[in-house]
Amino acid sequence: MTAEYKVHGAIAVITLNNPPVNGLGHSTRLAVTDGLVKANSDVAVKAIVITGAGKAFSGGADIKEFGSPKALQEPNLLSVILAVENSAKPVVAAVHSVCMGGGLELALGCHYRIAAPGCSVALPEVKLGLIPGAGGTQRLPRALGVEPALNMIVSGEPVKSELLAMIPGQKLFDKIASSAEALAAEALAYAMDVSEARPLPLVRNLPCRHPQGDAYFQFARNMVKGMAKNYPAPAKCVDAVEAATKQKFDVGMVTERDIFVNLMWSPESRALRHVFMAERAASKIHDVPADTAQRAINLVAIIGAGTMGGGIAMNFLNAGIPVKMLEMKQDALDRGLAIIAKNYESQVKKGKLKQDKYEQRMSLLSTTLSYDDLSDADMVIEAVFEELGVKEAVFKELDRVMKPGAILASNTSTLDVDKIAAFTKRPEDVVGMHFFSPANVMKLLEVVRGAKTGKDVLATVMTVAKKIRKTAVLSGVCDGFIGNRMIEQYGRQGGFLLDEGCTPAQVDKAVEKFGFAMGPFRMGDLAGNDIGWAIRKRRYQEKPDMKYSKTADLLCEKGRFGQKTGAGWYDYVAGKRDAIPNAEVEQMIATHRESLGINPRKISDEEIVQRLVFSLVNEAAHILEEGIANKASDIDIVYIFGYGFPPYRGGPMNYADEVGLFNVVQAMNRFAQNPLDDAAFWKPAPLLAKLAAEGKTFN
Ligand code: NAI
């Protein structure tokens, strides 16, 4: 049963019980309406309490039903709420821990609400490109007041119950329990208190006005427009709440429903819901069962206190996990330590971190110059120079000193994890943990599975990733793993576009208008153009037939490595990140173009975006086919969390699905006709060609 029914004296208690967060799936909804019927027909029952078992009152819709017809199957949530409102006996919602989305809408339909302190209350639908669809936009402004309600609906962010209860005139919570533990008993007592009250109060009957309505909503609309940009839902939240102030309740409910249904079909909401599901799916590995025994990780060692080592250490310190850092020399350790401290201090200065928290985190960090000090660590992450010989020396030492069962991870971004594993006598304990720079900020973690990596090691690393708040995606071993292997093709297209007539700024602008956080050339300047240069030099040896534009090499020959040298594709002013176009660079590109005998042509933004994005898609199709990525949605997650792909387009694979794979292949065939492009690359990957021919999608 996904909700329990029990009678305590004169009070019937309906307890939502659908772990993990009491999602309001069909069977739960049915159990609630059944409970209401039972309670109303039992003469011994005087009032009803609805509450949630375990860790939540209710987190809202059941994500297992997302977008399926089951979500609408009667009794749908609107019908359940109506049944609650129509109960002849008073219904008290006893909310605690988490009360979100449909859970809050259900509570708002109850006659009374008592909340435990510390309960997170939210209507987060906007984060999925939606508005609340079961009365939330109509009832919350009536219960809480128009402005705080709109703030909650537009932001989707949770607010603590005790803070909401302090809002003057609010009717959201009739009572705050003295403690979370006391909620159950106090809810029973409160239900008894109100058992004879008639008529029963309904939120729908409360007035809903804003004294300066027109001005306020105009103001709200302007604010939202500036911030929401390519996301349609926030502005629709304003419309729906305005309707609550101007329309009768039932009419406002129809307005809410119309907006909700329209948003449900929008590509933005489809994409955001895809990302939501994809992120949850990413942590699941098909051949690693959920109940795989995991290793305990209570102490982490990090080798190398450079750019990555320091950032990686901060992730663990933030999560309260002690870290030991090892370097070859004391001054390198001191430097690494100072950078970590400086990072935290700037957070303290900005008010983002309390001084005591900072001190607490630093106290978890210790340093050493000796491998023998690492024998008590449960996991070690290597972040030394990117050279196989250096990695070999380090991993041989680790094999010597680490305790049996310790996990040996490498942060390598290009090297073969299987070769690294072979430096040890325990390849099953070796795994890649590819963090992205800055490692304390970027959400993405590619977990690289070697041929011999143990399943329990993978399961443990996925859990550790969650603890340090990373979104982990599994990748197989290949050059560049998922993300960088794809970005190489994207970068190559960027080069061809310059050769054919674009400026870096034109390409970047087109891609940024599409929604990327940054175009390819600004990204190159941020990451350092020398990194790509080094990779290309290697490629020229390995793949002499592969076609490359030479412009990026010319740029690097001028020492224009990007932001770190103050000059790259653009110029930079010290301390600022604005990219200022540089006439010399544009001339350099033009001269090179002339030397190739190319007549520049005007290239449309649409062509720029398609060539760049479809180059990602085609490489991704190879990656999927080779089993480097387990599922298409994993690739979407890599690009959204690691490469600034716009979430409202759902990642490259979801975007290709939306465009239609047939159309993608058609465009690629066109690009292959361009003599200045690389026809061999544009041959659709077999998987892509097959799906397109069958009218299927990646996801
Ligand atoms: P870095 O040069 O900033 O830091 C490397 C540190 O390792 C230095 O402090 C050096 O003293 C230390 N080190 C070198 N050999 C050592 C040894 N034998 N024992 C102990 N310490 C040693 O380099 P960075 O950028 O932090 O890169 C480290 C690793 O992370 C590389 O494998 C790199 O490919 C990878 N990586 C780098 C990213 C980046 O954006 N910088 C992104 C993702 C991965």
Image (cartoon, rainbow, N blue to C red):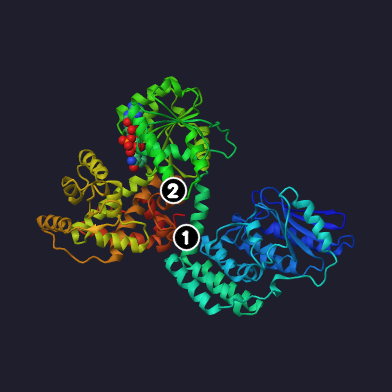
Q: Quadrant of residue 34?
A: bottom right
Q: Residue at x 86, y 60 (%)?
A: 45
- The answer to whether residue 204 is above or below residue 521 is below
Quadrant assignment for ligand 1: top left
- Give, as a three-letter code, the residue at label 2: Lys
Q: Residues within 10 Å of mark 2 (few under 14, many from 20)?
A: few
Mark 2 vs 1: CB contact within 8 A: no
Q: Camera-side residue: 514 or 184? A: 184
Q: Which mark is residue 271?
A: 1
Q: What is the secondary structure assignment of the residue under circle 1?
A: helix
Q: Which mark is residue 349?
A: 2
Residue 20, image x and y in percent?
A: 64, 49
**Visible residue check, residue 468:** no
Residue 419, image x and y in percent?
A: 36, 29
The earlier-in-sequence mark between 2 and 1 is 1
Residue 332, image x and y in percent?
A: 33, 31
Q: Camera-side residue: 138 or 410? A: 138
Q: Is residue 249 left or right of residue 585?
A: right
What's the CA distance linking mark 2 and mark 1? 37 Å
Q: Residue at x 87, y 58 (%)?
A: 10
**Visible residue check, residue 244:** yes
Q: What is the secondary structure assignment of the residue under circle 2?
A: helix
- The answer to whether residue 584 is above or below residue 367 is below
Q: Which mark is residue 525?
A: none
Q: Residue at x 30, y 54 (%)?
A: 576
Q: Residues within 10 Å of mark 1 (few under 14, many from 20)?
A: many
- Give, as a three-letter code, the residue at label 1: Ala
